[in-house]
């Protein structure tokens, strides 16, 4: 069973690192079990082999490395690396640890180099640590940051090469043991030697204490297996007041990163936009509407730009506390924007995804005509087929709405057919309605609900999961331009599985692949309908990650998207 170290005073730091409690046979069994999960449940297994030549089922060399591991933490690192080889945002080996080590500042990649973009001045008072935002991180403990980015890529196994590099940069100064097993090594060193190049050109070295929180973990001894079933853990997609028969459907409708705070990226999933510092009447002629009250799910307002009034609304994520309340608030904002603006900017940069059907319903309120919803190719493993069948029967017995019964019947039959035909994926299926074709939304009087004036959507490499799906529908429908950088490419439906009897870790699992209306050709990838890894390409490329944007709170970026939005509005008049 797991041993928790409740105080650092009671044990030495070295015992955290050197603990060796799992036997070679236990580690071998756990790794084989981890690989079996991907063999049975992982939807993109053939896609990853095509893209990266990574065969998740060929584990001979991995088992040889397992046998060579000297400590439990080394074994965990190997499991991390194996799952990271999939290059899947939704799939990561994680430990049940809340231990985090922090240096008191964060870095990200701006203009190709690592710049400091936030500091905790309580931890790093300016009198002792005078470096500041915009200064460049050169090395940590004698290791150049470019080498650290390579080494830490396995802790950032996301779909987009840019996202991987940026997330690896975050891991240098914020180290959660849940995804970095050897994060507890800082308990030995206690401090880090950090070299920083100041903006005046001077290079300075600082000794910075690691500040830690949470409980480091050890594993073992493990006298016998715990009871582990090959089952998915529930996603947060099911409302607590919904009937039990909705669980399987709601789990299938989830695509997102559950803990954006643990990612270490400034602004991920945040209601306030990354450039909130310049959204003022004096700087950008911006008047805020939503974003100041606790009940506001969105951040919204209007810009005055020459003779135009341009609306703005930020969608921070697609997992609101209540989807019905959030949709009502969105419709109210659209009603105001329809009456008072010439065009609308929808911001889903740094959006960590969530409920796929909430995202589809947002798209239906931005696209005032018939469009094709995101499709899903599901992995038809037998336990899921049985679960959908049982949920269908339960829905019938409970007198569920006919639409829910029809959805279950359609998904069950499609998975059963694919399974009987020996296929690893179904055809593209709808998950939110009975059809991939969505008709425009009308109110009780037959009026269009959707915003009908010009719209532009802001995206970046951390628009992920459902925030990949929504811009794909937007772009495929020809609704307006996408502005920014390509989306993350986390194009699946995901959940989490127990990863073994002994180590007691968890593994993310992509159970379905999102599909687009038509195949797209993107440099570096085969022509495909898949969003996974490929992402959604912007119509107007613009990179927020520049030093000018960092030092000016995003003013150049805001100026650019307003200029392009104004041109879009004028072109359509």
Image (tube, rainbow, N blue to C red):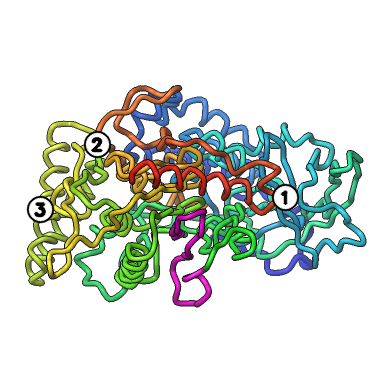
43 vs 174: above or below: above
Q: Picture coordinates of residue 254 (x, y %)?
A: 34, 55
Label 1 SS:
helix
Question: Pointers 3 and 1 in contact (CB under 8 A)?
Answer: no
Residue linked to disc 2: 517
- Calculate the distance from the C-alpha at mark 1 to the C-alpha at mark 2: 40 Å
Q: Quadrant of the N terminus?
A: bottom right
Q: Position of residue 415 (x, y in %)?
A: 16, 43
Task: Name the residue beneath numbered marker 3.
Answer: 409
Mark toward the viewer: 3 or 1: 1
Mark 2 or 3, nearer chain start: 3
Question: 147 or 3, which lies in front?
Answer: 147
In whole angstroms, how far apart are the C-alphas of marks 2 and 3? 23 Å
Res 96 → quadrant: bottom right
Image x and y of residue 428, in percent: 20, 39
User: CB of mark 2 within 8 Å of CB of mark 3?
Assistant: no
The reply to whether residue 384 is in sight is yes
Q: State the extent of the magenta-drawn residues as a range.
A: 288-315
Q: Is residue 491 visible?
A: no
Mark nearest the camera among 2 and 3 is 2
**Could you say which disc has been placed on residue 551 in the image?**
1
Labelled pair 1, 2 in contact (Cβ < 8 Å): no
- Left or right: where does residue 313 sit relative to residue 13? left
Q: Is residue 227 magenta?
A: no
Q: Earlier in the sequence, mark 1 or mark 2?
A: 2
Q: Which residue is located at x 25 percent, y 40 percent? A: 377
Nearest to viewer (mark 1 / mark 2): 1
Q: Position of residue 282 (x, y in %)?
A: 64, 64
User: How many angstroms separate mark 3 from mark 1 (CA)?
Assistant: 55 Å
Residue at point 79%, 36% (across, down):
143
Give neighbour class at mark 3: few <14, some 14-19, many 20+ (Cα, 10 Å).
some
């Amino acid at each position: 069973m797991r041993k928790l170290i409740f105080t650092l005073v009671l044990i030495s730091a070295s015992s955290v690192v050197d603990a060796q409690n799992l036997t070679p046979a236990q580690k071998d069994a756990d790794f084989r079990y981890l690989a079996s999960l991907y063999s049975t449940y992982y939807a993109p297994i053939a896609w990853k082999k095509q893209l990266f030549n990574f065969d998740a089922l060929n584990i001979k060399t991995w088992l040889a490395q397992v046998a060579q591991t000297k400590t439990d933490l080394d074994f965990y690192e190997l499991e991390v690396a194996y799952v990271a080889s999939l290059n899947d945002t939704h799939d990561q080996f994680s430990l049940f640890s809340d231990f985090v080590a922090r240096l008191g500042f964060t870095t990200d990649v701006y203009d190709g180099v690592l710049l400091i973009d936030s500091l905790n001045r309580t931890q790093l008072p300016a009198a002792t640590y005078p470096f500041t935002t915009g200064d460049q991180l050169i090395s940590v403990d004698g290791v150049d940051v470019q080498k650290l980015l390579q080494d830490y890529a396995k802790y950032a196994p996301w779909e987009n090469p840019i996202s991987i590099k940026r997330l690896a940069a975050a891991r240098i100064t914020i180290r959660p043991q849940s995804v970095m097993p050897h994060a507890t090594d800082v308990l030995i060193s206690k401090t880090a030697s950090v070299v920083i190049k100041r903006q005046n050109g001077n290079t300075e070295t600082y000794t910075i204490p690691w500040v830690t929180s949470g409980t480091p973990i050890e594993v073992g001894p493990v006298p016998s297996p715990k009871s582990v079933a090959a089952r998915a853990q529930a996603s947060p997609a099911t409302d607590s007041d919904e009937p039990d028969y909705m669980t399987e459907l709601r789990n299938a409708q989830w695509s997102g990163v559950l803990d954006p705070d643990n990612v270490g990226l400034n602004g991920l999933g945040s209601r306030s936009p990354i450039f909130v510092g310049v959204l003022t009447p004096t700087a950008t002629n911006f008047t805020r509407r939503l974003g100041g009250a606790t009940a506001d799910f969105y951040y919204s307002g209007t810009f005055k730009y020459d003779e135009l009034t341009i609306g703005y609304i930020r969608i921070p994520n697609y997992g609101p506390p209540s989807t019905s309340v959030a949709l009502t608030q969105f419709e109210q904002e659209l009603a105001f924007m329809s009456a008072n603006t010439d065009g609308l900017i929808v911001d889903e940069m740094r959006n960590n995804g969530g409920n796929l059907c909430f995202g589809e319903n947002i798209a239906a309120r931005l696209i005032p005509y018939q469009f094709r919803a995101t499709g899903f190719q599901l992995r038809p493993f037998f336990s899921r087929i049985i679960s959908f069948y049982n949920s269908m029967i339960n829905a019938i017995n409970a007198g569920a709405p006919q639409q829910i019964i029809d959805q279950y019947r359609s998904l069950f039959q499609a998975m059963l057919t694919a399974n009987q035909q020996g296929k690893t994926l179904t055809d593209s299926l709808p998950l939110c309605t009975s059809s991939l074709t969505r008709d425009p939304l009308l109110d009780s009087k037959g009026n269009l609900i959707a915003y009908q004036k010009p719209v532009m959507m802001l995206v970046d490499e951390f628009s992920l999961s459902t925030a990949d799906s929504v811009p794909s529908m937007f772009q495929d429908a020809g609704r307006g331009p996408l502005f920014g950088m390509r989306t993350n490419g986390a194009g699946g439906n995901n959940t989490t599985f127990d990863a073994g009897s002994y180590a007691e870790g968890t593994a993310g699992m992509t159970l379905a692949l999102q599909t687009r209306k038509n195949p797209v050709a993107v440099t570096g990838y085969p022509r495909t309908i898949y969003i996974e890894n490929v992402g959604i390409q912007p119509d107007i490329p613009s990179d927020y990650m520049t030093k000018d944007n960092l030092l000016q709170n995003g003013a150049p970026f805001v100026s650019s998207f307003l200029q392009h939005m104004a041109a879009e509005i004028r072109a359509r008049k």
